[in-house]
Amino acid sequence: YYNENTILYFDGEYLKATEAKIDLYGQSLHYGYAVFEGIRAYKTEKGEVKIFKAMEHFDRFKRSCELIHIPYNYNNEELVAACYKVLELNNMEEAYIRPLMICPPNMTLKAASESHLLICAWEWGAYLGEKLLRVMTSSYQRPNPKAFQIESKSSGLYVNSILASQEAKQNGYDEALLLDINGNVAEGPGANIFFEKNGKLFTPPPGNILPGITRATVIELARELGIPLEEKLFTIEELKQAESVFYCGTAAEVIGWDSLDGQTFPKPWTESLGKLLQQAYKAKVLEKEFKREAKVA
Ligand code: PMP
């Protein structure tokens, strides 16, 4: 993720990653009380470096901090400018950008009265790879929305994601699928889910999921392409009747599924609505024109 030349942003300064320091008594380290974002920059068709949906990411970053009472004293414009500066100082064009808000030393369980901001970036290929995913229904649920601010992209919440991913890998799968506390399908450890059935797309509504920015983009693209889409709760049994399924997220982009718990989906990925949206998404981030090919129903 970094080497001796890497530069990061920390509280308004640009520092060498190998020289920046954080306090080992920090509340974020001890209690997972921190907030982060995951953003991607792309080199567009015109050759410009563009951060995709930067405003949406920083709106969510602010909301995530507010939901768990971490002080946030920034405006989007200055943070977006800091991201571009980090990319420039590291000579990066296509990169994953990670803002992280951390809290100073404090061993109590009181909300923070101060925070510190790190922004770093690294080159990262498709997070879940390019191959269709073999997914396992996790024995772990997504956290109870009444036990946590689950719409806050908080560090501590990601122990749940790590456990689910690890369980899936240990069982020979590529990735996990987590249910919500009521047994409906929620999302992946780091991505939102969509499935296709009878020419229509379905995705769980907000409530038990992280409201993904890629999810919102996919919904927007589906509308533009005239693909019917419904946000609704559904079970694993219903998902197993799907024709095809995909995950989406900033790091993963749009990635199709091969199977769930060993059961494959009948529609070839190349003919699926997911594939069409994968292409439309790629075109959107690269600011390329995209036309729906007639062959996809
Ligand atoms: N759900 C979870 C749990 C995630 O960690 C992510 C990645 N941020 C997503 C969904 C997708 O969100 P986004 O499209 O905003 O990256």
Image: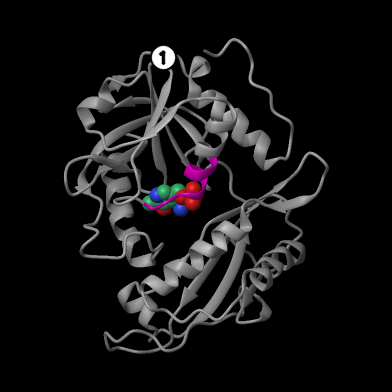
In this view, which residue lies farthest toward the top? 295
Q: Height in image: 70 above or below 142? A: below
In this view, which residue lies farthest toward the left? 182
Q: Height in image: 219 above or below 114? A: above
Q: Height in image: 160 above or below 235? A: below
Label 1 element class? loop
Q: Residue at x 43, y 82 (%)?
A: 103
Q: Label 1 belongs to which residue?
A: 267
Residue 288 in percent (x, y) is at 74, 34
Locate residue 84: give its quadrant.
Answer: bottom right
- Relative placement, left or right, of 145 versus 231 is left
Q: Height in image: 240 above or below 208? A: above
Q: What is the three-letter code of the residue carrying label 1?
A: Lys
Locate residue 173: give its quadrant.
Answer: top left
Q: Which residues are magenta?
A: 210-217
> Is 214 one of the magenta-colored residues?
yes
Q: Residue at x 22, y 40 (%)?
A: 184
Q: Quadrant of the N terminus?
A: bottom right
Most foreground residue, 75 or 33: 75
